[in-house]
Structure formats: C-alpha cells, structure tokens
Image: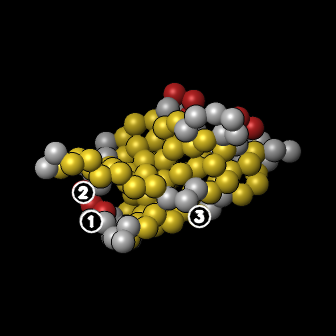
Amino acid sequence: QVQLVESGGGLVQPGGSLMLSCAASGIMFTIYNMGWYRQAAGKQRELVAVITSGGSLNYADSVKGRFTISRDNAKNTVYLQMNSLKPEDTAVYYCNAGDYRNYVHYNYWGQGTQVTVSS
C-alpha cells in the first residue's frame, strides 16, 4: 500500500526557515515525479514545486528563489527547504507522487502538514 508521510511543518516567524520531508513507501520511488502542493484556508490547492524522476525542477513563481525541492532516491524521500518565509506561505503542505505509464495515471497524496508563518 502506498504511503506518503510528511513531516517538518510548524510555526515560524516571518523571514524564518523550515524544511519539510516526505517519506514514500509502497512505490518505485525513482520513477515517480515528486511534488509539493499547498492549500491555504479558503483557497484551492496549488503547485509549489516539482522534481521529476530525471531531476528537472519546476517552481511556482511565488516561491522561486526562496524554496528548494530535492530528493534522495536512496531514502525514498523528497524535501522542501523553505527560506525567507512570508505570512502568505501559511498553508497545509501536501506531498504528491505522480507517474504516467501504460496509459494509466498514478497519483498519490500525503496527509498534509501545517505551515504557519506568523509573528
């Protein structure tokens, strides 16, 4: 059974940093594109950052230069380093694993971890 378990969320002051981790199990991690999404209260879920199975990176404009996504295939883990945090980064952050093969789209989500940026 597939599990994505996020950790590392919490309360941080504006300008501070947090690192989120997502440990995956039950999937062949190396072939999946891994992403972080977030959903603020009353808003739709939005893409934050993606790292493909080949290592290509993509970021939302709002986090470019502040957030860094990375993956450790040996540990089946994807990370999101968040620096210079702003109150508008407050949201529940979700880990995603996605793959498309043999005409089937595979898509899995973690349970989410709360990030609150406030003084």
| Disc 2 from disc 1: Cα separation | 6 Å
The answer to the question of whether label 2 and label 1 lie on touching residues, with beta carbons closer than 8 A, is: yes
Q: Is residue 105 visible?
A: yes
* Mark 1 closeness class: few <14, some 14–19, many ≥20 residues within 10 Å: few
Identify the residue under disc 1.
28
* Mark 3 closeness class: few <14, some 14–19, many ≥20 residues within 10 Å: some
Mark closest to the chain's N terminus, 1 or 3: 3
User: Which percent across, then down, holds residue 77?
Assistant: 42, 64
User: Which percent across, then down, holds residue 3?
Assistant: 43, 67
The type of residue carrying mark 3 is: Ser
The answer to the question of whether label 1 and label 3 lie on touching residues, with beta carbons closer than 8 A, is: no
The type of residue carrying mark 1 is: Met
| Disc 1 from disc 3: Cα separation | 21 Å
- Report the front residue among 98 and 65: 98
Left or right relative to 91: residue 78: left
Which numbered marker is on residue 31? 2
- Report the front residue among 79 and 43: 43
Q: Is residue 89 visible?
A: no
Left or right relative to 7: residue 68: left
Q: Residue at x 35, y 51 (%)?
A: 107
The local secondary structure at tag 1 comes to loop
Mark closest to the chain's N terminus, 3 or 2: 3
The local secondary structure at tag 3 comes to strand
Q: Considering the image in quadrants, where does the C terminus appear? A: top right
Identify the residue under disc 3.
7
The local secondary structure at tag 2 comes to helix
Visual colour scheme: secondary structure
Numbered disc total: 3
* Mark 2 closeness class: few <14, some 14–19, many ≥20 residues within 10 Å: some
